Amino acid sequence: AVVLSFAGLVGRVAGRDPTADPMGRSLRQRIDDVIADRDFQLLLQPIAALASGTVTGAEALCRFRPTPYRSPDRWFADAHGVGLGRALERSVVAKAMEVLPDLPRALTLSINVSLDMLASDDLPALIDGPFSDRVVFELTDHAGVQNPSTLRDRIKRLRQLGARVAVDDLSASYASLSTVLQIKPDIIKIDRTLVRSIHLDPASQALAAGLVHFAQAIGATVVAEGIEHAQEARCLRDLGVSHGQGFLLGRPGSLTALQTRTYLT
Ligand code: C2E
Ligand code: MG
Ligand code: MG
Ligand code: MG
């Protein structure tokens, strides 16, 4: 680690881009290439009804070439940092719309989008067509809604096409609660930090029950994410959470993997 950080320091002193890859390409160039070549994969993770195990939808999760490894949320944050965020997100949505016709007919497809993207005017044209009513947009960041009325307008147009909006990673953070109040989403996704070991923690159970109650009041569906253990799934179901997602129910995988397991036991 000492050697690595020393090399990083030398690189910086010598004026080299510390984010450059072994070929010396800057992060911006790499993101540009990723967009131009559509050089990423979409994995699909099942979302299932907790009572029956029936898969009702899938979430598209982006994978980039791991050289060196960066998690998808870092890729998107970096892309936004160099002004390429929306372009990258547009190509993700376009690719997801190409996957959608091959999904089993009853399934929805959840696509992650930033607040910047959801508030832009780009999405309706990207999803317009026979499959728009199977799209769910998951709002992944809670940077704080600057202009709630514009955002509500954009969401209204998406809903006219039959699409739905989810607020992702809802936890105890005030930012996500205020977002939920402002946009009244169709779906609330309870974050893994609240799901982890929920069966052992009465305070987490109370908070989840409160979110279920809140969701009922605004007519939203609740999806719990990051479910890894059967006890967590049972506890969430008993608290009134209708849907779940996580390694227990299925890992992010290929379209074929999803097609062959529309039902879980
Ligand atoms: P997210 O939307 O909250 O996605 C859920 C993350 O939890 C995914 O990580 C998924 O692989 C992981 N996960 C699912 N089940 C489990 C589980 O049981 N246990 C654990 N420990 N993890 C689980 P991933 O794929 O690394 O994505 C991380 C984040 O990157 C996403 O969080 C999302 O915010 C962002 N992201 C991914 N794809 C896209 C995309 O296409 N567009 C945008 N804007 N953001 C994306
Ligand atoms: Mg998500
Ligand atoms: Mg999430
Ligand atoms: Mg997340």
Image (tube, helix red, strand yellow):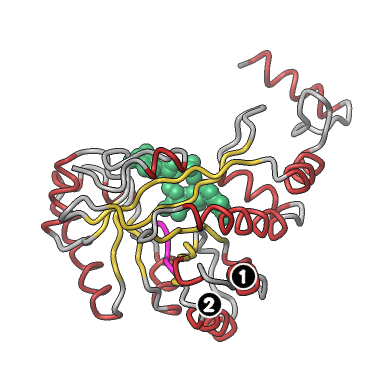
Identify the magenta region. Answer: 165-169
The quadrant of the picture occupied by the C terminus is top left
Q: Residue at x 63, y 50 (%)?
A: 77
- Quarter of the figure with residue 243: bottom left
Q: Residue at x 69, y 40 (%)?
A: 39
Q: Which mark is residue 123?
A: 1
* Crowd tier of the residue under label 2, counting other residues whose Cα lies within 10 Å: few below 14, some 14–19, many 20 or above: many
Q: Position of residue 186 (x, y in %)?
A: 37, 73
Residue 96 located within the stretch drawn in magenta: no
Q: What residue type is labelled 2?
A: Leu
The quadrant of the picture occupied by the N terminus is top right
Q: Which residue lies furthest to the top in this view?
A: 3
Q: Where is residue 159 in the image (x, y as percent from the top left)?
A: 48, 79
Q: Which amino acid does label 1 sit on?
A: Leu
Q: Residue 158 carries which label?
A: 2
Does 188 sit left or right of 98 as displayed? Answer: left
Say whether disc 2 or disc 1 marks the residue closer to the N-terminus. Answer: 1
Does 128 sit left or right of 214 as displayed? Answer: right
- Determine whether the residue tagged by mark 1 lies in a helix, strand or loop: helix
Q: Is mark 2 within 8 Å of ligand 1?
A: no
For the residues labelled 2 and 1, the Cα–Cα distance comes to 8 Å
